[in-house]
């Protein structure tokens, strides 16, 4: 559950001073702790200094494209919402493929932004909270829930999952052996009631599959042609899995 | 992309957007927000005029895109729609800068009205 009383630390990366101020003021009024950046360079510094828990990212920045920052944000382990005046489907798809967790087209509804941030905040755990109780194992794949990481076979930390990949993995683990329709993935993972190009889902599954492979486990994500995807386990005896929030 | 005639039919300001901003923020923040909005617009419009003089189409489209985002968020829907056309590479309306200035003033006035 989202801790409504907690002050989540949010970084707003936006080149328009008016939009920065509007969004920052609104989020501060609603109890968030907000830091600001307006360029790629400044945002990279801010990621290191402020260690934000959530990032709001504009794509058109004065010294480059916000796309170039998504990998840095993902590497920092912060969920990311892209806000942009770019309305083409390819911009939404590309943002999600690169690891963004959500996309909103300007003009944005401030209340909607807050709700989406709170939804993403469900994936956040306090910094440095990883411990043994947060490691769960499923068919030889160990997952560090707190840090959203697939733990390698030798016990070393492995690939960190993006928030979208983590949501997808949860969905698979909650219903192992069952086919999950693309529409369900679009709705529950990408937060979309529809999606124009299912390639975004294929790419997301592909990335998750690669990261699971680094764990050396026995889980397979199988494409069920024309329907969706399913998590195959070595035997059909499904092991229920319910990671704590 | 909207046609010019469809854009001409739009109201200069979308009252719903203005109301949302007013409801979202405490009144004491409105003066500062208005000032920042005006500075933002003036800066972008100044850069836009410079890009036009330099015939720098790439920069023109980039700044138009920025203006589209700012105006759309602050309810200046007509100016945002014109800016969107320029950002997509359409011809520049000779009155564009003046239209944006009028839209800026209309937003400023609407935000400050209690």
Image (cartoon, rainbow, N blue to C red):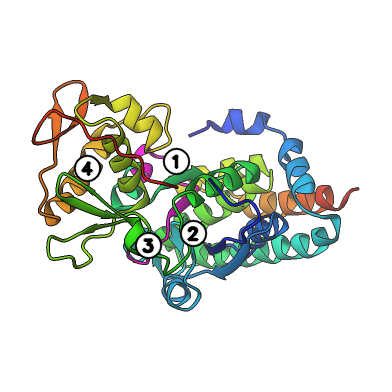
**Contact flag, marks 2 and 3 (Cβ < 8 Å):** no
The spot of residue A143 in percent (x, y) is: 26, 53
Which residue is at a point 37% across and 62% down the rendered structure image?
A: A77
Q: Is residue A84 shown in magenta?
A: yes
- CA gap between label 2 and label 3 equals 9 Å
> What residue does disc 2 label?
A54
> What residue does disc 1 label?
A87
Callout 3: SS:
loop
Chain under disc 3: A
Q: What is the span of residues highlighted in magenta in the rendered image?
A: A75-92
Chain under disc 2: A
Mark 4 vs mark 3: tell me if same chain.
yes
Mark 2 vs mark 3: tell me if same chain.
yes
The spot of residue A221 in percent (x, y) is: 15, 37
- CA gap between label 1 and label 4 equals 21 Å
Of the two numbered discs 4 and 2 in the rendering, the one whose residue sits closer to the viewer: 2
> What residue does disc 4 label?
A203
Which residue is at a point 12% across and 65% down the rendered structure image?
A: A154
Against B10, residue B93 (above or below) is below
Q: Is residue A9 shown in magenta?
A: no
Disc with the residue nearer the chain's start (4 vs 3): 3
Which residue is at a point 58% across and 40% down the rendered structure image?
A: B81
Mark 1 vs mark 4: tell me if same chain.
yes
Residue A151: quarter of image: bottom left
Disc with the residue nearer the chain's start (1 vs 4): 1
Callout 2: SS:
strand
User: In the displayed structure, does residue A122 sit left or right of residue B22?
Assistant: left
Q: Is residue B95 visible?
A: no
């Amino acid at each position: 559950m989202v801790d409504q009383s907690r002050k989540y630390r949010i970084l707003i990366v936006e080149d328009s001073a008016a939009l920065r101020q509007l969004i920052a003021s609104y989020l501060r009024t609603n109890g968030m702790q907000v830091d600001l950046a307006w360029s790629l360079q400044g945002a990279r510094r801010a990621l290191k200094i402020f260690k934000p828990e959530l990032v709001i990212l504009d794509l058109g920045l004065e010294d480059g494209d916000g796309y170039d920052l998504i990998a840095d944000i993902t590497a920092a382990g912060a969920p990311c919402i892209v806000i942009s005046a770019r309305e083409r489907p390819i911009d939404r798809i590309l943002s999600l493929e690169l690891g963004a967790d959500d996309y909103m087209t300007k003009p944005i509804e401030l209340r909607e932004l807050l709700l989406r941030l709170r939804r993403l905040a469900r994936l956040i755990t306090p910094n440095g909270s990883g411990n043994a109780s947060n490691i769960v194992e499923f068919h030889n794949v160990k997952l560090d829930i707190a840090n959203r990481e697939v733990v390698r076979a030798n016990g070393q930390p492995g690939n960190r999952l993006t928030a979208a990949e983590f949501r997808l993995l949860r969905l698979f683990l909650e219903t192992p052996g069952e086919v999950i329709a693309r529409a369900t993935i679009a709705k529950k993972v990408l937060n979309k009631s529809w999606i124009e190009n299912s390639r975004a889902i294929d790419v997301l599954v592909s990335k998750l599959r690669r990261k699971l492979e680094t764990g050396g486990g026995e889980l397979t994500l199988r494409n069920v042609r024309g329907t969706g995807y399913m998590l195959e386990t070595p035997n059909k005896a499904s092991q229920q899995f319910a990671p704590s929030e | 992309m909207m046609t010019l005639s469809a854009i001409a039919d739009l109201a200069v300001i979308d009252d719903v957007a203005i109301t949302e901003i007013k409801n979202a923020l405490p009144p004491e923040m409105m003066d500062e927000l208005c000032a920042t909005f005006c500075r933002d617009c003036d800066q972008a419009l100044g850069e836009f005029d410079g890009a036009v003089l330099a015939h720098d189409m790439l920069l023109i489209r980039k700044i138009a895109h920025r203006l589209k985002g700012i105006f759309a968020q602050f309810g200046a829907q007509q100016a945002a729609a014109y800016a969107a056309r320029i950002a997509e590479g359409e011809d520049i309306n000779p009155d564009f800068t003046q239209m944006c200035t009028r839209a800026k003033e209309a937003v400023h006035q609407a935000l400050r009205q209690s």
